[in-house]
Image (cartoon, rainbow, N blue to C red):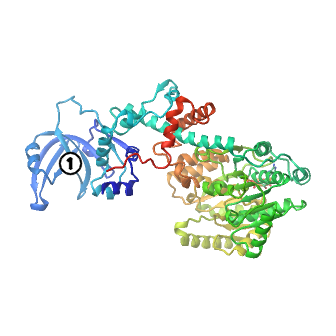
Amino acid sequence: MRAELLQKELGIFTFQDLLEHFPYRHLDRTKINLIRDIDVSTEYIQVAGKVIGVELLGDKRSRRLVAELRDASGTLELVWFQGIHGVQKFVQVGGEFLVYGRVSFFQGSPQLTHPEIEVLQGQGAAPPEFLEPVYPTTEKLKVRGLGGRQLGKLTQVLLNMLKEKDLPENLPASLLSYPDADTGVPKVWLSRYEAYRQVHFPTKPALFHQAVNRLKFEELFLAQLRLGLIKSKRHRSSHGVVFTQVGELFNRFYTHHLPFELTGAQKRVLKEIRRDTGSGRQMNRLLQGDVGSGKTMVALLSMLLAIDNGFQACLMAPTEILARQHYQGISALLKDLPLEVRLLTGSSRSKSRKEVLGLASEGKLHILIGTHAVLEEAVQFRRLGLAIVDEQHRFGVAQRARLWSKAEIPPHVLVMTATPIPRTLAMTAYGDLDYSVMDELPPGRQPISTVHRYEDRRPQVMDFIRHEIGKGRQAYVIFPLIEESETLDYENLERGYENIKAWFPEPKYWISRVDGRQKQEIRDTNMQRFLSGDTQIMVATTVIEVGVNVPNATVMVIESAEKFGLSQLHQLRGRVGRGTEKSFCILLTSPRLGKEARERMSILTETNNGFKIAEKDLEIRGPGDIEGTRQSGLLNFKLANIVQDRYWLELARDRAMELLEKDPDLEMEENKALKAFLQSQRGKTAWSKIS
Ligand code: ADP
Ligand code: MG
């Protein structure tokens, strides 16, 4: 019964699970608190004082013994419903006690029910050093007698049963020492066995910290090792199609149709891609570039490379609008080349869909651009050589894998992120991929000026837009759209739109409105009118978030900016500053801002660097919330946290790489235990069931 509840409520199936159900904190039983310090957030407390009154209250069922305990700061009630007789003998007026228990409130005053209580020793005799673990639990478990403390007891029983050999060392001997995080001085890890004991029931705070660090390192190291193994196995065994040459199409485009000189970063990444695709193994590369760094051109040139070598290519975008825009942009650039470029999205008409499918399977189609629709079973290529995924943040790992099944020999895969992700995150979430960074913007770009304004400055903001439009520029006004309150958001959008229309009346001004509720045709038309400059203002929801490219737009106003996350704001801001004119981003917020929102606004006004912003975002929000990584499961560490434990992560990464370099298949004697451990961890270890 209890076992079943533990499984359901906490996912604890095995002894191992129980051991890995770590306490989220420890109570320091050596510490004596003041009664005055109790507040609603206090869970457990230890106090010392004198009993100044004992009373037996209620009758029969509600019979209880209530003692009043006083210390220098106040008084507290101690309550017993059971064992009253024994307690009465022990707890008497005038006695001094050390009391420990869980705090509850009764009619507004704090009390401890059934506390642990002992006679207070004379001055100086400190209570025994003991850190009591507090475990995460659920209400359901609590009422079934499996609260935090009972879980502790269960864990203690288990630990007492386990011998050193039950929790054998899994790190190879060479990894048992490590440089201390603060001093760099070499230290030796606690053994695995000792670490588990200390992490639950530390005998000293210092040992607890050593234990936690050891287990964090182990966790990160194993994760890095797994990723490293996947990567190195693929490097050695996966064979990929080979692009031997840079051919006619690539050269023709490069010399006659390339609208600008490539940046150094673009050239470098293209070289990396050429090297990968010529190597005979399958490319799996993550391309990180800041907003506006010119990833699309890299994608296009890579696709030409594939076609020159007799292969087909596809480019996938996360939204219909973005797919369309890529399609239009790329078709225009390639219009003088003898290439078949097609679009496939969820809303493609069945006739054109059939045609596209036919062309793809016959091999007559050179480039397919589309949304997730490209992943459907029905889409079969004759010779797919390269698949590019744009704006990876919204693409799951599983979807990436589906691309590979589109051809007998898996195509090369290039994944391009929408906004940079922090290095630590990339290391863990995409550690199985090779990695390129474009940290350079095309020349001639002026940095975007970003300002934060409260809503009462709206008139000035509107004047500013008018001024820019007067110079022939265009502006975006973005409204938040958050799913949970969709209707409300649309009302806001509606009101906002009317408001903007009042500031910018027709026929002098024209406004495009774009939101997710519109019919595809309407949305496209409105979008198109803004692209071609027929409208000067676009009022939109975040549907335009990624990728949209209108170089003439120089103003981005973000309404209720406090409702967006940092990366999203950066991504939105990236819609301006794409041409040579000076661009502006105005973050409009309510004057009542929380600390965190204020911090976000100030980071954005301070820097345009997406890599820095991504680091901050991770710091503020934590890894769990970073879009697109949540479902990957790769960041669900039990103890480690990739923000706070950066030191251990980098150490783990380095050690894992060193080890794999020396022993790529973990065949050396010293890595035997490690290998066996990794194998035993595959899937759920049915170590032993909890009875
Ligand atoms: P992102 O990396 O955000 O996808 P895009 O590929 O949309 O960026 O490129 C942003 C803009 O920069 C586009 O207008 C594109 O034509 C232009 N661009 C790309 N590369 C260069 C370059 N080397 N020199 C000048 N402009 C460039
Ligand atoms: Mg892009």
Against 538, residue 203 (above or below) is above
- Circle 1 residues within 10 Å: few <14, some 14–19, many ≥20: many
Quadrant of the image containing the N terminus: bottom left
Against 453, residue 267 (above or below) is above
Look at the numbered disc 1 and give the secondary structure of its residue: strand
Q: How many marks?
A: 1
What amino acid is labelled 1 in the image? Leu
Front residue of 599/215: it is 215
Where residue 389 appears, as percent x and y from the top left, is 70, 55
- In the picture provided, is 221 more to the left or to the right than 200? right
Front residue of 58/275: it is 275
Where residue 562 appears, as percent x and y from the top left, is 56, 58
Where residue 644 appears, as percent x and y from the top left, is 51, 40
Q: Residue furthest top?
A: 185
The answer to whether any part of residue 583 appears in the image is no
Q: Which residue is mark 1?
A: 76
Quadrant observed for ligand 2 in the rendered image: bottom right
- In the picture provided, is 532 more to the left or to the right than 134? right
The answer to whether any part of residue 255 appears in the image is yes
- In the picture provided, is 247 more to the left or to the right than 39? right
Against 474, residue 81 (above or below) is above
Where residue 377 appears, as percent x and y from the top left, is 67, 65
Residue at mark 1: C-beta within 8 A of ligand 1? no
